[in-house]
Structures are given as structure tokens and as C-alpha cells.
Amino acid sequence: MRRSIFTFLQYYEYFTTTPVLLILPFSASILLSQALSASSFSPLLNIHGWFKPLMGFSPSSQFFSLLNIINLSQTLFTSVFTLFFALTSLLIGKLLIIQALIHQKPFFQVPFSSFASLYKPLLLTQLCNSILISFINVSAFSLLFTAFNTLEAFGFTTNNPLLLLVAKAIFYSVLANASVICNLALVVAGWGNCTGFAAIRKACLLGWKRNSIIFSLNLPINLCMLAVEGLFGYRVARADHIIERSGLSLAMEGMLIAYLYSLLIVLDTIASCLFFKNTKEDLQTDYAAGGYYFQIKIVKKEDQTDDA
């Protein structure tokens, strides 16, 4: 994390302008989608309420309370609302950061052909990431649904708050692992090694080897992002603030908060790039050391045979 902040400050003029301004539409769409899902649109987004009569749960079942807690409706709405910006604004901004770190200089000194040739792998990887996240969400939802249904079928109560807390923790831990792997897969694809599901597979291997490090990097940035989202909801999205303040003042403060959110995405991308670079170098060093040791063993065996 210290090296990420140092790298960010080393190219402060670049990282706080071009990539941040490109990521800004995506950040604004994230914050707006969460504000809309919590506003008057929320009854329309009550997805689990539509399916409740079809799933065979009793009216007192706490499974749907769990869906309220994990914000399933808000997650689906945000994913659809921000999809276009995730495939354009976010990817281009991340690509500029990755290119700057690969060439150790800002993007305006990097050939345009290099940028154009790397956007397609990132786009393909992002689409694969979306498929993976959707699959994991559906799988986790199905497992929770089966578990709650089985417990109620055997007469166990699901009204225990501790059970809901454990289910929520499992759901978010699985989702957090998938999110970290997907972010790292974009860096792998941007570095020009592989793309699509191959990049996700390589990111899984790298994340598995240094699991504690990558999640310790991701946790503080995610907490800061949650704080910025809360700040946007408190300062911009509240109904009394919208009524009391002028549109220009509200819009300017909203853009400033979205700018802060974009800065955190930039820092997160820098941290993922440095993690990938260091892990790759360590693996190459370990492989070279292992090969050298293997060659020494062979030479020693040949010497012993000649002596005999």
C-alpha cells in the first residue's frame, strides 16, 4: 500500500487528471444508481417481492429478510445501470493506468497503437468478469435458498438473527473474493499476457498464492469507497438537501464526491498492478532458483556416476 501511494504521488499530475476524468462517468453512475435505488424507485426494484409467492416460503420466512439485508435488488439495478460505463469509461481509465505503469511514463508519451491494441483484451475480460460475477451471485443465492428451504422443511426455525448474520457474511465474502479476482484479471489482461477466462484463471492462481496480501490491499480501499458512497447519500441524495439547496450547488458537490470515488478506483488499480508485477517477479525468481537447484542435483549425480 505504501508503494502504491508513492507511485500515485510520483505521477500525481497525471493520475489526478486524465484517468480520473475518464473514470468519473462510471463513478457518477455508481453513486446515482445507489441513490435512485434508495429513493422513490425502490418499490419498483423490490424484486424478491415479485418472486415471494412463487418460491413456497411461508410469510414469516426470514430468507427474504436476508435478501433485504444483502440488497439484491439494488445490486442488480446498479449492475444494469452502470454496465455501459463499466465497459467504456472504467476500462479506458484503467487501461491508461496500466499502460503508464508498464512503460513507467504517462500515457501521452505512449504510442496510440499500443493503447488501441490492448482495449479489446480488457473489454473481453470485463465481459467474462460480468458473466463470472453473475454466475457467482446466482450460485450463492441458490445455495442460500436451498439451505433455508431445507432447514424449514425439517422444522428448524430460520428466525435466528445469528443465522442471518452468518449467511450474510458468507455471501459477501464470496462476492468480495470474486470482485478482487476480477479486478486482478483486468490487470493481467492489460499487461498483455492473456485475456478472457484465461486471465481470470491466472488471476485466481496469483490470488491463491498471495491471498492474504491481496485482500489486505483491497480491504482499506473498499472501506474508503463505502465511506464515499455514504457521504454521497448524506450530502447529495437526501430529500431535504435536494429541496433546500440549488441545483448547481448540489451538482458541484456531487461531482466532487464522484471525483473522490474515481481517485480511489485509480489507487486500487495501481495497487493491483504493483501486486501483479511483484508476484510475477517472485514466481519467476522461484522458478529460476528451482531450475538452478535441479541442475545442481543432476550434475552431482553425474559426477558420482563417473567416479564409480
Image (tube, rainbow, N blue to C red):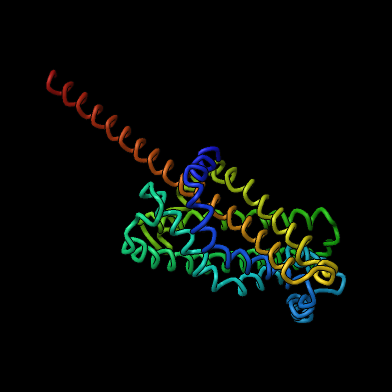
Q: Residue at x 82, y 66 (%)?
A: 241
Quadrant housing the C terminus: top left
Residue 98 placed where, x, y %?
A: 43, 54
Say left or right for 218 vs 228: left
Above or below for 285 versus 257: above
At horizontal 79% and vertical 58% (from top left) the residue drawn is: 164
Quick one: quadrant of the N terminus?
Answer: top right
Residue 250 against residue 48 in the figure, above or below: above
Q: Total of numbered circles in the picture? A: 0
At horizontal 66% and vertical 68% (from top left) the residue drawn is 142
Q: Nearer the viewer, residue 160 or 275?
A: 275
Q: Quadrant of residue 216?
A: top right
Left or right: where 171 falls relative to 216: right
The answer to whether one can see residue 5 in this image is yes
- Residue 102 position in % (x across, y down): 38, 50
Q: Quadrant of residue 244?
A: bottom right
- In percent of width and height, residue 48 lies at 75, 75
Q: Is residue 122 or residue 109 the one in the foreground?
A: 109
248 or 79: which is nearer to us?
248
Q: Please determine whether, in this image, residue 246 is positioned above or below residue 281.
A: below
